[in-house]
């Protein structure tokens, strides 16, 4: 029987990057709204879990989201950064 190992922080954050990249790419393709909403919900829940467990800080998540958003849509504006911070604040407050 193989011993299960806990993923490293780097592996978990790589998974988050992949999830974000998929959501941001799909957003550009404008697929069905229900699928997009579900995908966003998965990412929100994943990030909430990372915050709640202390596995990642708000700043780390902001940097990952900003980096993936830049890959998908170009450089962010200050308004986009404020929206990302507000969304993370809502996740934290929930």
Image (cartoon, grey):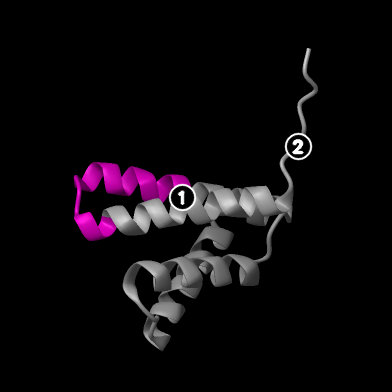
Where 28 sits versus 75, above or below?
A: above
Q: Position of residue 41 (x, y in %)?
A: 41, 47
Residue at the top extreme, as displayed: 1
Question: Circle 2 sits on which residue?
Answer: 6
User: Which is nearer the eye, 68 or 51?
Assistant: 68
Q: Which residues are magenta?
A: 27-42
Question: Circle 1 sits on which residue?
Answer: 19
Q: Position of residue 75 (x, y in %)?
A: 39, 81
x 48%, y 72%: residue: 66
Q: Is residue 17 magenta?
A: no
Residue at the bottom extreme, as displayed: 78
Mark 2 is surrounded, within 10 Å at the Cα level, by few (under 14), some (14 to 19) or many (20 or more) other residues, namely: few
Mark 1 is surrounded, within 10 Å at the Cα level, by few (under 14), some (14 to 19) or many (20 or more) other residues, namely: some
Q: Mark 1 or mark 2, which is nearer the start of the sequence?
A: 2
Q: Give residue 78's quadrant in the image.
A: bottom left
x 45%, y 71%: residue: 84
User: Is 9 on the left-hand or right-hand side of 27?
Assistant: right
For marks 2 and 1, give the CA distance. 19 Å
x 37%, y 46%: residue: 39
Q: Position of residue 3 (x, y in %)?
A: 80, 22
């Amino acid at each position: 029987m193989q011993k299960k190992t806990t993923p490293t922080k780097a592996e978990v954050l790589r998974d988050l990057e992949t999830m974000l990249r998929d959501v941001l790419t799909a957003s550009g393709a404008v697929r069905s709204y229900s699928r997009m909403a579900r995908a966003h919900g998965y990412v929100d829940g994943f990030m909430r879990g990372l915050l709640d467990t202390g596995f990642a800080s708000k700043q780390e998540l902001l940097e990952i989201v900003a980096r993936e958003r830049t890959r998908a849509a170009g450089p962010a504006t200050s308004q986009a950064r404020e929206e990302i911070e507000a969304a993370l604040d809502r996740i934290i407050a929930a």
